[in-house]
Image (cartoon, helix red, strand yellow):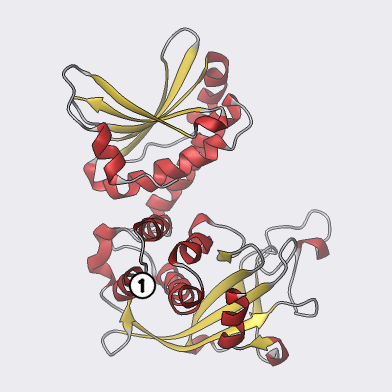
Amino acid sequence: MIVTEELWHDLEEPQAAPGRSIRRVYPESGRNLFLTVNHPGMQRALVLSVDAHAGEGAVRALGRLAPTAGLELSISAATRSVYELHVSLVADELREVFSPLVADIADAARQAGSDQKAMIAAINRFARWQHLLRSISKEGLGTRARRGLVGELFVLRDILLPALTGDEAVEAWTGPIEAHQDFQLADLAIEVKTNTSKAGNLVEISSERQLDPTGIPRLLLAVATLDERRGGIGESLNSLVDSTRERLSTGSAQAHLDDALIRAGYLPGHREHYLEPRYTQRHLRFWDIGVDFPRIIEASLPPGVHDCSYHLDLAGLDKFLVTQEWVAELLGS
């Protein structure tokens, strides 16, 4: 679900008396989820309504959350038998973040099997957004996060978009939602790594699941090797975002891209920080992760060992290399 400004504007239509405008979302899920706007204050919120027993059980989880400037999560008794969890926007500077935030929290809650599990899922997802927002400084994303985003956008713009529809390509980009691989299609997943020319052939694999093809007919590793410098003829992060967006022909694809960028930590209010540096693509290479490809996977770990990260030296692994043309044909098929 994409929560658009148009949807909020409909809810913000003036009312004759104080109260709130409500639109239910995911009614088929069995969860009582609503987007609301209070009148006359025009405060936007996501509301999850549950029975009182489920609400009381979630209050303890809420107590562990630290406050976040601009956002508020609260639980209150609407009646003797009904509790409501409110995720509210309390500062306009986070307006651009709020729509993807509530869409993500609502999606987590709708997938829960009960009201109490939905409350816990919503609180945990709110905490994840808190972590994301705190990790982004006033100067925007850090160097490593910028490089990672640049690499994923190169793959999206230059590889997926020529082979798929805009909606298919953007919906396949799962890196911003912390999936095991950065791109996931029905028959193919692609994990993207970005390094600079100084790093040579070394890439960091951050978990035992990233190069694990379990449940995936085919898994590829993409490595974008970049030159990074201030000035010059390379592309800034802003120009890469803009050129990717220009290649999307539908409003739904553009909305999905904007949503994914915010989840990745790229906030429109920080664009002034992304004019430099500029990135030039030296190589964009792909490895087919077959059974003989050297890697650590979950099934090979001894009991009690998990959350592994390691460095992979790609030197000498040329027999697993595939061309961009081969990848394009695979995507097209």
Point out residue 248 in the picture as x, y percentages from the top left corner: 37, 67
Q: Residue at image x 45%, y 49%?
A: 131
Quarter of the image that includes the N terminus: top left
The residue at which mark 1 appears reads as 247
**Nearer to us in this view, 237 or 20:** 20
Q: Can see residue 145?
A: yes
Vertical relation: 320 (above or below) 18: below
**Nearer to us in this view, 264 or 310:** 264
Q: Can see residue 94?
A: no
- Kindly identify the amino acid type of the residue bearing the numbered disc 1: Arg
In the visual, does 226 lie left or right of 308? Answer: left
Vertical relation: 79 (above or below) 126: above
Q: Hey, which quadrant is residue 146 in on the image?
A: bottom left
Vertical relation: 290 (above or below) 206: below
Point out residue 108 in the picture as x, y percentages from the top left corner: 53, 40
Q: Residue at image x 47%, y 17%?
A: 83
In the visual, does 151 lie left or right of 188? Answer: left
Q: Residue at image x 60%, y 71%?
A: 190
Secondary structure under tag 1 reads loop
Point out residue 222 in the picture as x, y percentages from the top left corner: 57, 78
